[in-house]
Amino acid sequence: MILKVNDLAFCYKSHEAFKNINFSIHPGEITVILGPNGVGKTTLLKCLNSILTPQKGTVMVSDQNIKEMTVKQIARQISYVGQRIDSSRITAFDAILMGRHPHIRFKTSDSDLKKVDAIIKKLNLSHLCLKYLDQMSGGELQKVAIARALVQQTGILLLDEPTSSLDLKNQIHILELIKNIVIEHHISAVMTMHDLNAALRYADKYLLLKDKIIYGAGLIKDISSKTVQDVYGVNVDIVYYKGFPIVVPIGNEKAA
């Protein structure tokens, strides 16, 4: 176990976002947080690395309470890619190099530069190296942000809608890359997603949020059409194609 959440609750002033949240993640797994708009997926993700401070409960990272960790200690354990990506006047290379900051003691080393170069090649970003962030499309910014998170080399990746600005080809490329890195380096990833079918194809476990609580959780292979229907309010079937579950909306027809 690398991260454990116990009885987490968060409120925006008088508005309760969620309560009684309990789950854990393990190395080598991708967990996806699902649910309708406004249910608290992004808020929960931000509580996992202390961007937001929950009013109740604990987040334990490698048996240490995240409240007792410094910003730098958290950054060595957890990397985060948000939905909103800063498009400042720096190059893609420098933005990705910033991911090494938690590990740099005095100055950037040759090892740091090699790691940046390696992840740039993995994500096919060589053509963007010297391009400024404020000149990039949303999809290009998304890939640079993911590269920065990966070069941070943490045990936990938090990704808020990591494919939201990407076309189909790049969605597949990024999700397969995340999956391979999680497996190869035996780390964990937690993602929020709206695309149910992409989530079911690439994740190992799911959390479904509804009415401020975890309505359903478990292995992807065990997710049921009834649970999806209850959470999203849409009649669906779950069918399998080449071993992967696919959510098929069936309108007003009765789900099988």
Image (spheres, grey):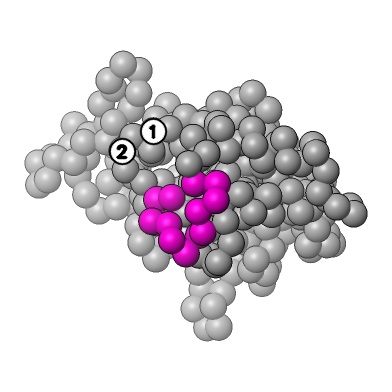
Q: Residue 173: where, in percent of width, then height?
A: 43, 32
Numbered label attached to residue 168? 2
Residue that label 1 marks: 172
Furthest-top residue in this view: 242
Q: Quadrant of the N terminus?
A: top right
Q: Position of 111 compared to 233: left or right?
A: right
Q: Position of 160 compared to 47: left or right?
A: left
The residue carrying pointer 2 sits among few (fewer than 14), some (14 to 19) or many (20 or more) residues within 10 Å by Cα, namely: few
The residue carrying pointer 1 sits among few (fewer than 14), some (14 to 19) or many (20 or more) residues within 10 Å by Cα, namely: some
Q: Amino acid at mark 2?
A: Leu
Q: Residue 78: where, in percent of width, then height?
A: 70, 49
Occupied quadrant, residue 152: top right
Q: Position of 212 compared to 235: left or right?
A: right
Q: CA distance from mark 2 to mark 1?
A: 6 Å
Can residue 219 be seen by looking at this rendering?
no
Numbered label attached to residue 125? none
Residue 89 sits above or below residue 247 on the image: below
Mark 2: which secondary structure?
helix
**Cβ atoms at labels 2 and 1 below 8 Å apart:** yes
Q: Is residue 136 magenta?
A: yes
In magenta, the rendered stretch is 128-140
Q: Residue 242: where, in percent of width, then height?
A: 31, 16
Residue drawn at (68%, 58%), measured in percent from left and top? 49
Residue drawn at (63%, 68%), measured in percent from left and top? 52
Comparing 239 with 118, the one in front is 118
Q: Amino acid at mark 1?
A: Ile
